[in-house]
Image: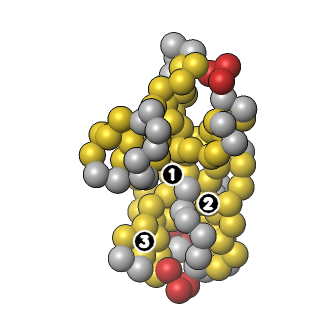
């Protein structure tokens, strides 16, 4: 299965990095390994801040799937389980599926990885 992503990606110097745009016109780039000019935040997490005009592209990506025949967004993973958020927008269906209501109109659950189908990454 491809990596589960839910967040910004920035293309900088021909490479894609996890990213966080700031209100100050800068974009924080993150890398999982030591990369030239990046500072270590903790093992396996490095950051560099660059001006937004240096970024070739910025997009938001998320990983979607189908579980129990319904559309979901994958928002996390842990030891063979995926945290899925219902994307169908119908409360009666969410209730029928036994999902946990985490906020108004937001329904989530843990799904066994092997029950999840049609996993794909999309830009929004």
Q: Residue 17, relative to residue 91: is it above or below?
A: above
Nearer to me, 81 or 5: 5
How crowded pointer 1 is (Cα within 10 Å; few <14, some 14-19, many 20+) is rated as some
Q: CA distance from mark 3 to mark 2?
A: 15 Å
Residue positioned most to the left: 42
Q: Secondary structure at mark 2?
A: strand
Residue that mark 3 sits on: 110
Circle 3 crowding by C-alpha within 10 Å: few under 14, some 14–19, many from 20: some
Which label sits on residue 41?
none
Identify residue for label 1. Answer: 106
Element on which disc 3 rests: strand
> Disc 2 marks which residue?
63
| Residue drawn at 54 percent across, 73 percent down | 96
Determine whether, in the image, residue 8 is placed left or right of residue 107: right
Q: Nearer the viewer, mark 3 or mark 1?
A: 3
Q: Is residue 19 visible?
A: yes
Alpha carbon separation for disc pair 2 and 1: 17 Å
Q: Nearer the viewer, mark 2 or mark 1?
A: 2
Check contact, mark 3 vs mark 1: CB within 8 A.
no
- Vertical order, 109 against 105 (above or below): below
Which one is in front, 59 or 31? 31
Q: What quarter of the picture does the C terminus occupy? A: top right
Residue at the location (36% across, 76% down)?
79
Q: Secondary structure at mark 1?
A: strand
Q: Image height check: is 48 above or below 88? A: above
N-term mark: 2 or 1: 2
Q: CA distance from mark 3 to mark 1?
A: 14 Å
Q: Residues within 10 Å of mark 2 (few under 14, many from 20)?
A: many
């Amino acid at each position: 299965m491809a990596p589960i992503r839910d967040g910004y990606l920035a293309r900088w110097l021909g490479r894609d990095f996890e990213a966080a745009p700031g209100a100050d016109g800068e974009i924080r780039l993150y890398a999982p390994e030591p990369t030239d000019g990046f500072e270590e935040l903790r093992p396996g997490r490095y950051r560099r801040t660059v001006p937004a005009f240096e970024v070739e592209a910025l997009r938001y990506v998320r990983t979607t799937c189908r579980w129990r025949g319904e559309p979901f967004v994958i928002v996390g993973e842990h030891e063979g389980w995926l945290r899925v958020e219902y994307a169908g927008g119908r409360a009666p269906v969410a209730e029928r599926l036994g999902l946990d209501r985490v906020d108004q109109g937001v329904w989530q659950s843990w799904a066994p990885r092997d029950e999840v189908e049609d996993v794909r990454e999309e830009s929004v």
